Image (cartoon, rainbow, N blue to C red):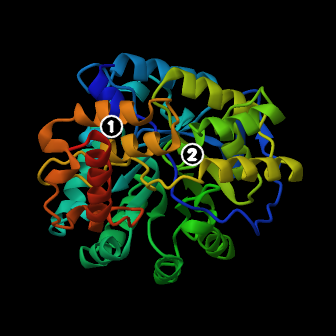
Amino acid sequence: MNRREFIKNSILAAGSAVLLSGCTLKSEAPAVTGGVAVSKFKNINVSKLGFGAMRLPTDANGNIDDALNKKMVETAINAGINYFDTAYMYMNGKSEKAMGDALKKYDRDSFNFTTKMPVMMLEKEEDVERIFNEQLERCQTDHFDFYLVHCLNKHNWENTKKFNVIPFLEKMKKEGKIKYLGFSHHDTPELLQEIIDYYDKWEFVQLQINRIDWKTCRGEEQYNIARKAKLPIVVMEPLRGGALANLNPEAVKILKDYNPDISPAAWAFRWLAGLDGIFTMLSGMTEPEHLDDNIKTFKNLKPLSEEEQKVYDEALAAHLKNQTIGCTGCRYCECPVGVDIASIFSLYNQYKQDTTGMGEVGFISHYGALRESERADKCIKCGLCKAKCPQQLDIPTLLEKVDKEYKRLAGA
């Protein structure tokens, strides 16, 4: 991987603040079948660890490394992972095909293939059927086990109703092309309740839940709404875009002093393991080492004890004491003029948290290595990125903040 791709795929640090109190977790002992732990969804076993395909391995040119991806999928299958999650726009629209290529040699009944309807991209009702058929072709399958209406916020929910997405997906269910229908949510608890109330046949929901977002993004409220509605939960961003796997040195020391044998990522997954109703947790594993560590965690998945929860909160408080930007690196915010928003925020967060030891000099060097057209000062403040951001960040204002910090440090 070259330097530019290292920048683009750098792990992002966490949000600027978090309330770490007032959380009571329930322990749920997952079943183990010799591989990773599994949950029961309806009448099937689903691996507690889901293989997320938003951050697949890439080569030096920034393209998906298909050979490495296939090896990682093979490792996952052999470890008992049977839930594979992709989406129409992931990896610049290439993730679905890559996952189809990687999974086509396996017995189709041995794994669950998941993708999503990109309602944010719809321009007319006919697009719904066109995209769905394209997804079947890309994924080289005749059906999807789990299918979601993607990234529902206020705007995308209006698109869902406007273009009659749900009636079409119901038809696909009747034709056997979808087994289970759900949605992923990226907005307020109030909208979540509205979506649940609108359609009483949802079978599952995908929510962003992790220790940081439990309070700051009202994750606890959304979790409770889903539980009250008896909707099984898929967790997205369990590591907050990698931030919870890449804590700053002070936080890592707190965790390692308590238990040197488990990774920061394992702490995050074990915190989630204490929540009932979650049937799988998605992890976007870019490197084989990420997959290996996760498999180790999920083969012996145990919720944090009360004492461990206190240690974990202490570590996160140490990690979050410096002001950072709560970007997860999803890249939904593609800029019309080419500003590389995700890389800019990643570099800034690494500098503020000093997770790579690069400090001010490294930040100046790596930020300065971005193309002129990709830098924060090229933002035209059109606001399109802000409307697309699942984290509801004020991206233009934050880009201005990063630009001022860079110029201050660089003496520009």
At x 77%, y 26%, the residue is: 261
Q: Is residue 355 left or right of residue 66?
A: right
The picture places residue 10, in percent across and down from the top left corner, at 41, 34
Q: Which mark is residue 239?
A: 2
Residue 362 picture quarter: top left
At x 63%, y 32%, the residue is: 294
Q: Secondary structure at mark 2?
A: loop
Task: Choose between 132 and 268: the one closer to the eye.
Answer: 268
Disc with the residue nearer the chain's start (2 vs 1): 1
Q: Is residue 245 above or below residue 124?
A: above
At x 18%, y 43%, the residue is: 374
Q: Is residue 6 above or below residue 133?
A: above
Residue furthest out toward the front: 411
The picture places residue 169, in percent across and down from the top left corner, at 36, 64
Do the CB atoms of the residues marked 2 and 1 lie less than 8 Å apart? no
Q: Is residue 126 above or below residue 130?
A: below
The picture places residue 122, in percent across and down from the top left corner, at 20, 64
Residue 295 picture quarter: top right
Few, some or many C-alpha atoms within 10 Å of disc 1 (few <14, some 14-19, many ≥20)? Answer: many
Spatial CA span between label 2 and label 1: 20 Å
Q: Looking at the image, how many numbered discs can be counted on the residues?
A: 2
Of marks 2 and 1, the one in the foreground: 2
Q: Which mark is residue 95?
A: 1
Quadrant including the N terminus: top left
Residue 88 at least partly seen: no
Task: Choose between 241 and 129: the one closer to the eye.
Answer: 241
**Residue type (three-letter) at the residue carrying disc 2:** Leu
Few, some or many C-alpha atoms within 10 Å of disc 2 (few <14, some 14-19, many ≥20)? Answer: many
Quadrant including the C terminus: top left
The picture places residue 249, in percent across and down from the top left corner, at 62, 35
Residue 130 at least partly seen: yes
